[in-house]
Image (spheres, grey):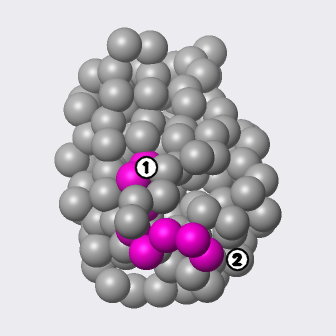
Amino acid sequence: MVSFNIYGHKNILGTHRNTIEFTKDSNLSLKGDCIIGVKADFDINEIKTILKKYSKIKIIIIVDNFREEINAVSNKDFNDEHEIVIRKTDFISDRTLGINADKAVIDLDRKLVDKLKNPETIGKVEIIGIK
């Protein structure tokens, strides 16, 4: 398992129908409607270790008492030190952590999304390999 922190931002919308994204950027425009966390402090090498071992992953987002789980197929070629994208589709790029996900950001509990609209909110993301 790999875990990292994400932070809220006033411009988080959580309305994209196909993707979920975490970014290391600290700023966010209203165009980033798939971004659910900024200032993500993930280590790409830790993530790559999980992706090499497992063909499927579970991504868990925890904010206060709210918890969301997303299941996806691993992209073994993930290679972005700045952004993580999880997609409902099968489109793959260096930024793509997982494809064929069972949720996009629009599918997440609105209470969790609302919490992440507060810049003071700190959330946790866990990536777990599934055999």
Q: Is residue 18 above or below residue 4?
A: below
Picture quadrant of residue 16: bottom left
Residue 76, x across and y down, in percent: 57, 81
According to the picture, the residue beneath numbered tag 2 turns out to be 79
Quadrant in which the C terminus is drawn: bottom left
Q: Position of residue 27 (x, y in %)?
A: 69, 43
Q: Residues within 10 Å of mark 2 (few under 14, many from 20)?
A: some
Q: For numbered disc 2, what is the local secondary structure?
A: loop
What's the amino acid at mark 1?
Ile
Residue type at the position of mark 2: Asn
**Numbered label tally:** 2
- Quarter of the image for residue 19 reads bottom left
Q: Could you tell whether 42 is left or right of 115 in the image?
A: right
Q: Is residue 4 above or below residue 18?
A: above
**Which region shows up in magenta?**
52-59
Relative horizontal placement of residue 32, taking residue 69 as reference (left or right): right
Going 60% across and 22% down the picture, which residue do you hit?
Answer: 122
Any mark on residue 2, and which? Answer: none
Q: Which residue is identified by label 1?
A: 59
- Residue pictured at 72% horizontal, 49% vertical: 42
Residue at horizontal 43 percent and vertical 75 percent from the top: 55
Frontmost residue, 34 versus 58: 58
Q: Is any part of residue 116 visible from this angle?
A: yes
Q: CA distance from mark 2 to mark 1?
A: 17 Å
